[in-house]
């Protein structure tokens, strides 16, 4: 393990870095182009995660639900003089948003939305209600007890309210499948099935919440809920929807 150097260094910690090697390389290129001093650190539960090889310093940490997870991050922040912490998976965003004050007392700025926004984004039912509140187009969505007894058009889509990475998400073709998956999927929601290309948008905001950039891409190949191959697209309606969301969060 390399030891921390000057407190002027902009040391960045990425949690749950996994296989996101290209992201780390992009940050390293930015460091070189801007002439910034600092180190790239990663934390992951898997000692064989590829990101360990792309970082200046890496740490194997307990699982997210382990009571020692947050203390481990606090020690890394203090010992390595970390200035910024970026969570890289959805559950980490929620965890770090809930415990932002403790982590920031250790000395780093945690780059996450506030807790209310994280709670909303982590709950697909709340996200649906939030989109309706903003007037954004969103699929019709039901809780299991609210699904209409008659007139439901199939196929529909069922997934966990708090799921991520595509886990527990199924296309449902008929009432028999709906009955089965409603008991199989934990705490589900049911949505109308929307055919067509799936587009994911990354939104970059400043510290004050100002929208700086939106990058949208059409998914060509997906691996564990994340884009493995995609092509960027420019769609003003998507940009405007992202702007409205960012303005509230």
Image (cartoon, helix red, strand yellow):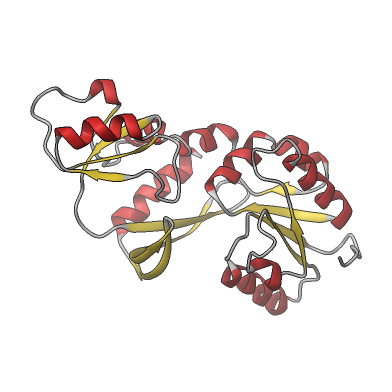
| Corner quadrant of residue 228 | bottom left
Q: Residue at 70% x, 52% y: name it.
A: 85
Seen from this angle, which residue lies furthest left? 151
Coordinates of residue 16 in the picture (x, y in percent): 63, 54
In this rendering, does residue 216 appear at all?
no
Query: 193 or 61: nearer the eye?
Result: 61
| Corner quadrant of residue 129 | top left
Query: 78 or 17: nearer the eye?
Result: 17
Query: 128 or 228: nearer the eye?
Result: 228
Q: Residue at 64% x, 49% y: name it.
A: 111
Instruction: Say if 141 sits above or below 63 in the image.
Output: above
Q: How many marks?
A: 0
Query: 85 or 213: nearer the eye?
Result: 85
Instruction: Say if 224 sits above or below 65 in the image.
Output: below
Instruction: Say if 24 sits above or below 86 in the image.
Output: below
In this rendering, does residue 246 appear at all?
yes
Coordinates of residue 193 in the picture (x, y in percent): 20, 44
Side of 166 relative to 27 (left or right): left
Q: Quadrant of the N terminus?
A: bottom right
Side of 172 relative to 228 (left or right): left
Coordinates of residue 58 in the picture (x, y in percent): 76, 63
Side of 71 relative to 210 (left or right): right
Q: Residue at 20% x, 57% y: name it.
A: 196
Q: Residue at 68% x, 72% y: name it.
A: 54
Coordinates of residue 17 in the picture (x, y in percent): 62, 59
């Amino acid at each position: 393990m390399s030891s921390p150097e000057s407190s002027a260094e902009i040391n960045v910690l990425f949690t749950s870095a996994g296989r996101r090697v290209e992201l780390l390389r992009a940050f390293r290129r930015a460091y070189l182009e801007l002439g910034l001093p600092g180190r790239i650190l990663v934390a992951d539960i898997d000692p064989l995660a590829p990101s360990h090889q792309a970082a200046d310093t890496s740490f194997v940490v307990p699982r997210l639900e382990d009571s020692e997870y947050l203390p481990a991050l606090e020690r890394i922040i203090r010992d390595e003089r970390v200035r910024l912490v970026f969570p890289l998976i959805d559950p980490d965003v929620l965890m770090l948003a809930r415990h932002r004050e403790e982590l920031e007392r250790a000395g780093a700025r945690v780059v996450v939305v506030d807790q209310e926004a994280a709670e909303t984004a982590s709950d697909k039912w709340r996200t649906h209600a939030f989109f309706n509140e903003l007037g954004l187009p969103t699929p019709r969505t039901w809780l299991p007890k609210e699904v209409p007894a008659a007139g439901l058009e199939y196929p529909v889509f069922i997934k966990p309210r708090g799921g991520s990475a595509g886990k527990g998400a199924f296309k449902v073709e008929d009432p028999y499948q709906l009955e089965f998956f409603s008991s199989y999927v934990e705490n589900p929601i049911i949505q109308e099935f929307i055919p067509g290309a799936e587009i994911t948008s990354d939104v970059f905001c400043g510290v004050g919440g100002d929208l700086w950039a939106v990058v949208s891409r059409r998914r060509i190949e997906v691996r564990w809920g994340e884009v493995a191959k995609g092509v960027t697209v420019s769609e003003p309606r998507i940009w405007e929807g992202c702007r409205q969301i960012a303005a509230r969060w």
